[in-house]
């Protein structure tokens, strides 16, 4: 896994050629022993000329995007703009659709993910889905699932506890680890899914509208969680809720009809968008 | 897919192979390809078993087919000693018992299905449907036992005398009855196929979209009128399908019929006379069959039975599926 | 209320009663069967009956122990042969299948399901009895196994399809391969349905007589091993019922009660479990 070292780099967006300085200060060092706390401004994903086809239909038209490490990147856009498709191509979940085809290049820390074993890609890039989808197993077995299929047999209990703590769920479930996951509330189930995804220690966590099925109070809790997690895990979140994007993310990409329209620091995109279409979307003229 | 042919990627144990091949090998090691192939082989195995069945029936009836040709179906002689085999009595018995059973079972079954699907409150309907499904699970030999010890005496002592005295002028009700015979077999078959008609018809009726009923009721129709004029016509394909299914079941039914039909390979015009069906003669004489021609004749009968039930089941399924699709599409 | 209206309402009530009567009649038959069996069979049902061999012709006493064990052996072979095939092909159809091949497989399965059981007996006779040159448990088990294939296949496919796709996606996203997903997530999620499907299939073939007539053939004594003729409950019921002796008739009732009891218990239990599962999932 290529590490960016400690060189501070100024990243450029490919859209308008202006150098953009990362908005937020570099993340503080955390006490959590993961190996993904790289220096600020390094890039997790480098995506160039990404096209996705479902059969003959071209759904994404040549996206160029770089995703920085240890920040939250939001993808916004109207329904059908391709943001979920884009997200799913980052962990090759597009391959579960028959007749889906990818063109272009997606580099994860310099490694081309289409050349890698897909299982390894998905261990490094985890996913949380729109509706919570815990397995019909116990809470413990849900979190341990990813570890077990990767052959981990020792210290499962510790790893499970660690993940549940990272997902801010440990205190609520520590006495009922062997109860069915379906006994939990919707918000707890979603946090369980986050814990399950974190258990294999991914470098990136992809979240596909993770709060759209949840109530506002639970949503706030999960948003808080995401902000806490970003120092140890890069996050890419698709959301149709612009306020959520504004609250939670550091950079935002606006997609429309399969094209990347604008991509910059969240604050700038929402207060002073460069493209008139972005402005039209965020002011609610269409959506 | 560009960039996947880069040979220097740290992407796993086989970086030197081109992308597509490497993916295949990795999937292979993970067991996905093996699983696909193995399950596919078993699926082909099912097709193989069925094909083998047809082949076996065909090949093992060859002596009889060559010896008798089409006359097999028009001759009445069934003479193992002189090796003259004609299937007509069995065809007659099979068809007559099935038709009489259907004539009795269809009104009963469709009527009950209408009651359960349209007129009864849902919990009552579910409970009764549960019981009727259990009826369908009763083994046929038990229906046979009941046939021998309950239906036979009933026919002999009550029903046959009654029919003779009232309708005895009709050829189908002539003659003395010892209790066994075509009518008894038909009665037992009726009891056996009614549950099938009920459960399939009920499901088909329940699949009719509610707006059909509601439209009729809103126009002032009574419940029965809405049922008989709107819902049943909409579902008639599926109901016909259930009748075909029941008929296929009746044709192939062996044990219960064998035990009460009388086992007499003659064609009589009276329902009260004993008779024989295809399934019954195979059951009774297969292990006694001496000589290849005899055995092949019996197997040829089995082939006939197979073909007839195959056609009926195929038609039935077409009808039922097409009715459910109409219901799903929501238009008549 | 004019005459026409009165007539229409009257017809409504009459038809309600008639159709209701048909239903009640049908249901009454089940209770009648049960009642008759319990009454006639209950008299002879005893531990003695269940654990003894048949008595010599015309003598009293004797039981159906060998028939019960024989049915058990036949069901075991049927299960060993039919269940894995049904399971694996059900998995193929639900998880892997291509469009046309799956259609052919499903069509063939339905075809196999509709074959009269006596014809399956002919099939098993030609394939197993003839080469072996004698009747056997294997032949009977094979016939019953062929009959369990379509039933387990359809219910396995049905329950696997009912597992929501979101579970498969969750497993794939965690890095599980397709087969691993099927084995660790999809099949366990569908397990109770699949098991009930298997039990219903076994209950169904346990009562079949016709395919055993010239494969298992029946046996007065214990059948050793797997390649000898073997007795079975349905065969015993059939032979005793059509026999001439009153003692045999009584034993037919008792054996019938045992068979029906087993079949009904399995059916009621599995259907209750299934209906509770489907209503809990809502």
Image (tube, helix red, strand yellow):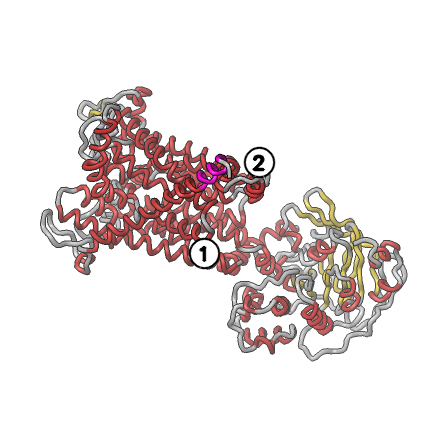
Q: Residue furthest bottom?
A: A31
Q: Residue at x 32, y 51 (%)?
A: C77
Q: Residue at x 35, y 48 (%)?
A: C27
Q: Which mark is residue A144?
A: none
**Distance from Cα at disc 2 to Cα at disc 1:** 31 Å
Residue B157 seen in the current view: yes
Q: Position of residue A13 (x, y in %)?
A: 85, 60
Report which residue position mark 1 lands on.
C275
Q: Residue furthest front?
A: C1
| Magenta highlight on residue C11 | yes
Q: Nearer the viewer, residue B110 or B317?
A: B110
Q: Position of residue A274 (x, y in %)?
A: 89, 58
Instruction: Please identify the quarter of the rendering in which residue B190 is found.
Output: top left
Write down the region rendered in magenta.
C3-12
- Taking the image as shown, residue C238 lies to the left or right of residue C158, namely left
Q: Is C50 placed above or below B129 here?
A: below
Instruction: Say whether mark 1 and mark 2 are on the same chain.
Output: no
- Taking the image as shown, residue A241 lies to the left or right of residue B320, namely right
Q: Residue at x 73, y 51 (%)?
A: A80
Q: Nearer the viewer, residue A284 or C177?
A: A284
Chain letter, disc 1 residue = C
Report which residue position mark 2 lands on.
B332
Q: Position of residue A244 (x, y in %)?
A: 76, 65
Residue B321 seen in the current view: no
């Amino acid at each position: 896994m290529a590490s960016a070292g400690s060189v501070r780099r100024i990243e450029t967006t490919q859209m308008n050629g202006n150098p953009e300085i990362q908005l937020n200060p570099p993340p503080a060092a955390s006490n959590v022993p993961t190996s993904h706390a790289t220096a600020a401004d390094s890039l997790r994903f480098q995506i160039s000329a990404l096209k996705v086809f479902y059969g003959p239909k071209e759904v994404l038209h040549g996206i160029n995007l770089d995703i920085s490490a240890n920040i939250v990147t939001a993808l916004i856009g109207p329904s059908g703009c391709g943001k979920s498709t884009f997200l799913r191509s980052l962990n090759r979940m597009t391959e579960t659709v028959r007749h889906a085809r990818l063109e272009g290049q997606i580099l994860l820390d310099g490694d081309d993910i289409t050349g890698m074993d897909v299982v390894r890609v998905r261990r490094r890039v985890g996913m949380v889905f729109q509706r919570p989808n815990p397995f019909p197993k116990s809470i413990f077995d849900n979190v341990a699932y990813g570890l077990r299929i990767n052959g981990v047999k020792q210290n499962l209990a510790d790893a499970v506890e660690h993940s549940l703590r990272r997902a801010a769920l440990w205190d609520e479930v520590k006495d009922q680890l062997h109860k069915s996951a379906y006994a939990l509330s919707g918000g707890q189930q979603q946090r369980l899914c986050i814990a399950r995804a974190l258990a294999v220690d991914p470098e990136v966590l992809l979240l596909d509208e993770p709060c759209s099925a949840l109530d506002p109070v639970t949503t706030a809790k999960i948003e808080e969680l995401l902000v806490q997690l970003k120092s140890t895990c890069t996050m890419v979140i698709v959301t149709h809720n612009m306020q959520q994007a504004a609250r939670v993310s550091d950079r935002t990409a606006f997609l429309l009809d399969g094209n990347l329209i604008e991509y910059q620091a969240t604050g700038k995109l929402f207060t002073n968008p460069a493209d008139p279409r972005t402005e039209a979307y965020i002011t609610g003229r269409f959506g | 897919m560009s960039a996947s042919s880069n040979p220097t990627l740290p992407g796993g144990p086989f970086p030197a192979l081109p992308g597509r091949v490497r993916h295949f090998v990795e999937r292979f090691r993970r067991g996905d390809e093996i699983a696909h192939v193995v399950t596919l082989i078993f699926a082909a195995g099912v097709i193989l078993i069925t094909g083998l069945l047809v082949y076996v029936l065909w090949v093992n009836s060859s002596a009889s087919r060559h010896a008798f040709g089409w006359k097999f179906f028009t001759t009445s002689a069934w003479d193992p000693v002189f090796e003259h085999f004609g299937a007509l009595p069995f065809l007659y018995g099979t068809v007559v018992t099935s038709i009489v059973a259907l004539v009795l079972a269809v009104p009963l079954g469709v009527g009950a299905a209408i009651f359960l699907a349209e007129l009864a409150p849902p919990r009552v309907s579910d409970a009764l449907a549960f019981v009727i499904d259990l009826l369908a699970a009763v083994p046929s030999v038990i229906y046979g036992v009941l046939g021998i010890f309950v239906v036979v005496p009933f026919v002999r002592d009550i029903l046959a005398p009654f029919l003779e005295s009232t309708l005895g002028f009709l050829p189908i009700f002539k003659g003395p009855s010892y209790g066994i015979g075509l009518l008894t077999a038909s009665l037992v078959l009726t009891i056996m196929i009614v549950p099938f008609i009920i459960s399939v018809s009920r499901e088909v009726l329940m699949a009719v979209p509610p707006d059909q009923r509601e439209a009729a009721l809103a126009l002032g129709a009574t419940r029965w009128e809405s049922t008989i004029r709107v819902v049943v016509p909409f579902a008639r394909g599926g109901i016909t399908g259930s009748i075909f299914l029941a008929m296929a079941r009746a044709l192939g039914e062996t044990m219960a019929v064998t035990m009460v039909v009388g086992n007499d390979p003659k064609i009589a015009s009276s329902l009260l006379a004993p008779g024989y069906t295809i399934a019954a003669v195979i059951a009774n004489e297969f292990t006694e069959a001496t000589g290849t021609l005899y055995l092949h004749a019996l197997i040829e009968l089995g082939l006939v039975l197979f073909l007839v039930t195959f056609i009926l089941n195929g038609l039935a399924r077409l009808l039922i599926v097409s009715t459910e699709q109409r219901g799903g599409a929501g238009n008549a | 209320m004019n005459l026409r209206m009165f007539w229409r309402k009257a017809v409504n009530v009459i038809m309600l009663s008639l159709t209701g009567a048909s239903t009640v009649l049908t249901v009454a038959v089940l209770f009648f069967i049960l009642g008759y069996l319990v009454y006639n069979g209950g008299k002879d049902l005893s531990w003695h009956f269940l654990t003894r061999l048949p008595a010599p012709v015309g003598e009293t006493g004797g039981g159906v122990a060998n028939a019960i064990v024989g049915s058990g052996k036949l069901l075991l072979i049927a299960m060993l042969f039919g269940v894995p095939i049904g399971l694996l092909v059900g998995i193929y159809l639900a998880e892997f299948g291509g469009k046309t091949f799956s259609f052919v497989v499903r069509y063939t399965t339905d075809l196999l399901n509709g074959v009269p059981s006596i014809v399956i007996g002919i099939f098993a006779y030609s394939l197993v009895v003839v080469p072996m040159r004698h009747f056997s448990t294997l032949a009977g088990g094979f016939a019953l196994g062929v009959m369990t294939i379509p039933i387990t296949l359809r219910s396995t496919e049905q329950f696997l399809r009912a597992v929501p796709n979101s579970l498969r996606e969750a497993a794939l996203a965690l890095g599980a391969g397709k087969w691993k997903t099927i084995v660790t997530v999809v099949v366990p999620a569908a397990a109770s349905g699949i098991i009930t499907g298997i039990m219903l299939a076994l209950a169904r073939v346990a009562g079949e007589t016709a395919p055993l007539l010239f494969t298992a053939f029946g046996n007065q004594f214990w059948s050793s091993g797997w390649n000898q003729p073997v007795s079975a409950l349905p065969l015993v019921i059939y032979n005793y019922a059509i026999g001439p002796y009153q003692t045999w008739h009584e034993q037919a009732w008792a054996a019938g009660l045992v068979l029906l009891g087993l079949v009904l218990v399995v059916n009621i239990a599995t259907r209750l479990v299934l209906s509770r599962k489907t209503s809990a999932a809502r």
